[in-house]
Image (tube, rainbow, N blue to C red):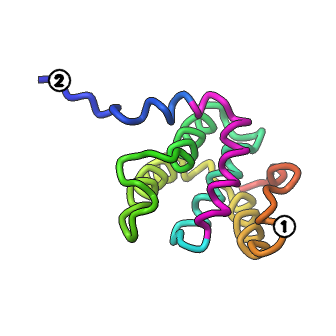
Amino acid sequence: MVVDFTVGFGPAERLAKRPNEVRKRFWAAFKRVAAKLPFAEDLLAAYYCAFDRTTPRHVQAALLGALAYFILPFDFAPDMLPLLGFTDDAAVLAAAIRALSSHIRPAHRAAAREALARNGEAAADGPPASPPPAAEG
């Protein structure tokens, strides 16, 4: 018997192929739930890595897929369920970060921390004009 473990990921895969749509929808979703996310810094670091022009294409594609899964309104555990809603999102993101952690640089993490620090101000309006500059490390 062959089991298809990709069931349910089709919408995320299609959305991941449209980076501008991911960018736009990411910030709307993030603003709604940022205070509830224990993995907000990791999520933002993955976002900045995915949109960094120096990040290899295959890494961008994988991270965009994880980000797309986060912004989809319907997934395995609906996000509006208390305590359980973001567990599947966190698992998908954790798997992507673990597999691609060597590409998430200190500059991406610093940009994530800055965005979280501005959460009540500019971060609520959207991302900075561009991803963090390429940095050594």
Instruction: Give the amino acid at mark 1.
Output: Ala
Task: Give the class, few, some or many, for how many residues have Cα within 10 Å of label 2's Cα (few <14, many ≥20).
Answer: few
Question: Between tags 1 and 2, which lies in front?
Answer: 1
Q: Which residue is mark 2?
A: 2
User: Toward which corner of the image does residue 125 lie, by quadrant?
Assistant: bottom right
Q: Residue at x 11, y 23 (%)?
A: 1
User: Toward which corner of the image does residue 118 lie, by quadrant?
Assistant: bottom right
Q: Earlier in the sequence, mark 1 or mark 2?
A: 2
Q: Could you tell me what secondary structure mostly forms the magenta stretch?
A: helix
Residue 26 part of the magenta-drawn span = yes
The x, y position of residue 61, in whole percent, is 59, 34
Residue 60 part of the magenta-drawn span = no
The x, y position of residue 27, in whole percent, is 70, 54
Vertical order, 21 against 83 (above or below): above
Instruction: Give the amino acid at mark 2.
Output: Val
Q: Which residue is mark 1?
A: 122
Spatial separation of the CA atoms under disc 1 and disc 2:
48 Å
